[in-house]
Image (tube, grey):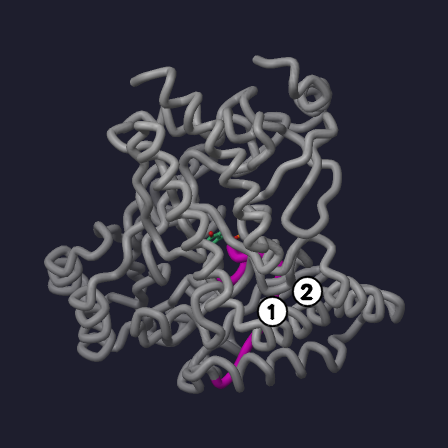
Amino acid sequence: MTDRYHRSRELFARARQVIPGGIYGHAAPATTVPGGTPFFAQAGHGCRYRDVDGHEYIDLMCGYGPMLLGYHHPEVEEAVATARARGAAFNHPTELTVTLAETLVRRIDFADWAVFAKNGSDLTTWAVQVAREATGRRKVVKVAGAYHGSHAWCSPGHGGLLPEDRQHVLELPWNDVAALESLAATHGADLATVVLTPFHHPAHGDSVLPSPEFVAAVEALRKRHGCLLVLDDVRCFPRLHLGGSHRAYGWQPDLAIYCKAIGNGHPLAACVGRGDWQVPASRVFLTGSYWHDPAPLAAALKVLEISDREDIPARLEATGRRLVEGLLALGKQQGLALEASGPFALPYVRVGNDPGFQRTQDLCVAAAAEGVFLHPHHNWFMSLAHTNAEIDEALTRLGRAVAQVSAQGS
Ligand code: PMP
């Protein structure tokens, strides 16, 4: 371990005394490179943040997605402050709940209704229950390696789970039409839902776009068996398409879930659905202590307004292309083979021929030391706050990291 993250390590030692595992979930040091990147953040502005040791980073992870417009975006923070000044969690919803539902119904072509919660997991799980309620069936098909949250039916963890939790969950490889048809042949009459992300963005793997054949096969299945397509758009919306990521690839969802970026960091998740499922949805219990808190709803309304004004998908695609093409060119210059996958707005780049991700981890450690925060086995995120000048600055810094890893050899 390097001394560069001294204060991070001190805090982690304190955390381990009083918090199980010290830091849990995707922010745990073990999920990146233990000791090689910071553990604790201090403050952020625009596309940069500082860690507790005072180092500044150009952030290419965007808080794992929520930071769409930049940390502490003035218009969003003003909307939040105005809502917050009126109070926090009331006995009732406020008008903002209705206004945001109306806004999403206008924006998302298939949606006739919306509900809100705080986390993606809250609503991927609820959507599965709605699909079961609507169809009276049990089986859920998901893609192996796809993440849909921390709840028992889909958690990638092991602790505290029972085999029964997954009894009705069936998995298939992404884009595997034959596997989908075989599952349908065996379980069609009991098939409640297929849960998919817009494109496959597994941890510890390259991103893969959907093949037109896979999209068509899911649609045929939906029509033939009357099961629901739940699109888990938690990670992508609105980076790929302002009308929902299904529009980018031709999916025909029944329900879709949005989260991460919708409040630019203020906690909110939304599930929208077709009118056919509004009555069954009303029968599936849904609540949470803070779910009507108006401030994140105000944030989301502002985020959507700014996303339209700034044409977020086009901007992020251009920014991501500049980053990815620049990085691949640096690899070529320095003799380090790099491979990119996924859409430019949520790109993923790793060192080629690196099955254990060791060299990709080395690259991320070297990048952090140069002031650029990347992840070795999770897709990255672009934001509106990444200007061309900041991408170019990131590339200059990454050039030194690439040279260092290239010099280390394989
Ligand atoms: N689905 C996807 C695709 C996600 O990326 C995530 C969060 N990483 C979730 C669901 C779960 O969301 P949350 O962590 O807010 O519960």
Residue 146: percent from the left, percent from the top? 35, 49
Residue 322: percent from the left, percent from the top? 44, 52
Residue 407: percent from the left, percent from the top? 37, 17
Task: Tell me what residue is drawn at x 24 percent, y 74 percent.
Answer: 222
Q: Is residue 77 left or right of residue 180?
A: right
Q: Which comes before the other along the chain, label 1 or label 2? A: 1
Q: Is residue 294 above or below residue 141?
A: below
Magenta span contains residue 118? yes
Q: Are marks 1 and 2 in contact (CB under 8 Å)?
A: yes
Q: Quadrant of the C terminus?
A: top left
Q: Amino acid at mark 2?
A: Trp
* Res. 401 visible in picture: yes
Disc 2 secondary structure class: loop
Q: Amino acid at mark 1?
A: Phe
Q: Is residue 313 above or below residue 387?
A: below
Q: Quadrant of the N terminus?
A: top right
Disc 1 secondary structure class: strand
Q: Residues within 10 Å of mark 1 (few under 14, many from 20)?
A: many
**Quadrant assignment, res 182:** bottom left
Task: Tell me what residue is drawn at x 45 percent, y 66 percent.
Answer: 127
Residue stretch in magenta = 112-125
**Quadrant assignment, res 195:** bottom left
Task: Tell me what residue is drawn at x 68 percent, y 77 percent.
Answer: 97
Task: Tell me what residue is drawn at x 26 percent, y 53 percent.
Answer: 170
Q: Which residue is mark 2?
A: 291
Spatial CA span between label 1 and label 2: 7 Å
Magenta span contains residue 211? no
Q: Is residue 289 above or below residue 151?
A: below
Q: Which numbered marker is on residue 116? A: 1
